[in-house]
Image (spheres, rainbow, N blue to C red):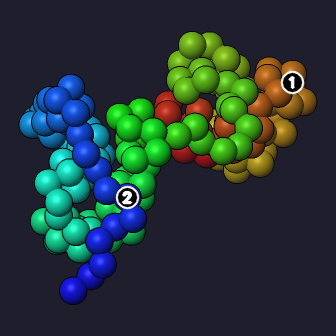
């Protein structure tokens, strides 16, 4: 029989009510519902293997959210900040005009006849913006333009 988790969970009335509310939502993100159910099952005394079997997830996933809840309570169930440098251009920047110069860059020769490296070089030469090649590729994909 598997050993009990080192992270035992006891819920107060407010925490249980909030987790039950989230677990019962039909239009909430799946990850939020899953995490709430993991904590509720853990508070009911189920072992990690039993919870993973009921929720069709890995034992490591159950252990992670059980540990995070015991360390930071409800706040621990939220996503952590992501690693890495923040984006220089916000999502959808091309639609707000920062990538608008891409259309102008393709007037002489269609963008569909250029590689992404050619488009990046053209944008940089003309001083349209200083976006990276991967950002330009993302903008083109958002606009459904395929170089």
Q: Is residue 52 left or right of residue 106?
A: left
- The numbered dot on residue 20 is none
**Count the marks: how many?**
2
The percent coordinates of residue 97 (x first, y second) are: 62, 13
The percent coordinates of residue 133 (x first, y second) are: 74, 42
Residue in front for this viewpoint, 102 or 68: 68
The percent coordinates of residue 116 (x first, y second) are: 70, 47
Residue in front for this viewpoint, 57 or 29: 57
Residue in front for this viewpoint, 89 or 83: 83
Q: Secondary structure at mark 1?
A: loop
- Which quadrant does the N terminus fall into? bottom left
Report the residue at 55% width, 26% height from top. 91
User: Which image quadrant for residue 16?
Assistant: top left
- Choose the circle earlier in sequence order: 2 or 1: 2
The percent coordinates of residue 108 (x first, y second) are: 72, 29
- Contact (Cβ within 8 Å) of mark 2 with mark 1: no
**Is 33 located above or below residue 14 in the figure?**
below
Report the residue at 22% width, 68% height from top. 47
* Residue highlighted by disc 1: 126
Q: CA distance from mark 2 to mark 1?
A: 59 Å
Q: Secondary structure at mark 2?
A: loop
**Is 46 located above or below residue 127 in the figure?**
below
Report the residue at 68% width, 31% height from top. 87
């Amino acid at each position: 029989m598997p050993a009990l988790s080192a992270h035992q969970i006891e819920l107060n009335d407010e925490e249980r009510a909030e987790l039950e509310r989230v677990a019962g939502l039909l239009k909430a993100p799946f990850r939020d519902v899953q995490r709430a159910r993991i904590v509720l099952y853990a508070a009911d005394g189920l072992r990690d293997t039993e919870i993973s079997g009921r929720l069709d997830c890995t034992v490591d996933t159950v252990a992670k959210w059980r540990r995070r809840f015991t360390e930071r309570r409800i706040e621990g169930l939220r996503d952590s900040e992501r690693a890495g440098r923040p984006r220089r251009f916000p999502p959808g920047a091309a639609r707000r005009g920062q990538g608008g110069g891409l259309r102008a860059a393709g007037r002489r020769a269609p963008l569909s006849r250029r590689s992404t490296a050619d488009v990046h070089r053209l944008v940089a030469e003309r001083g349209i913006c200083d976006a990276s090649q991967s950002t330009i590729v993302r903008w083109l994909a958002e606009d459904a333009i395929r170089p």
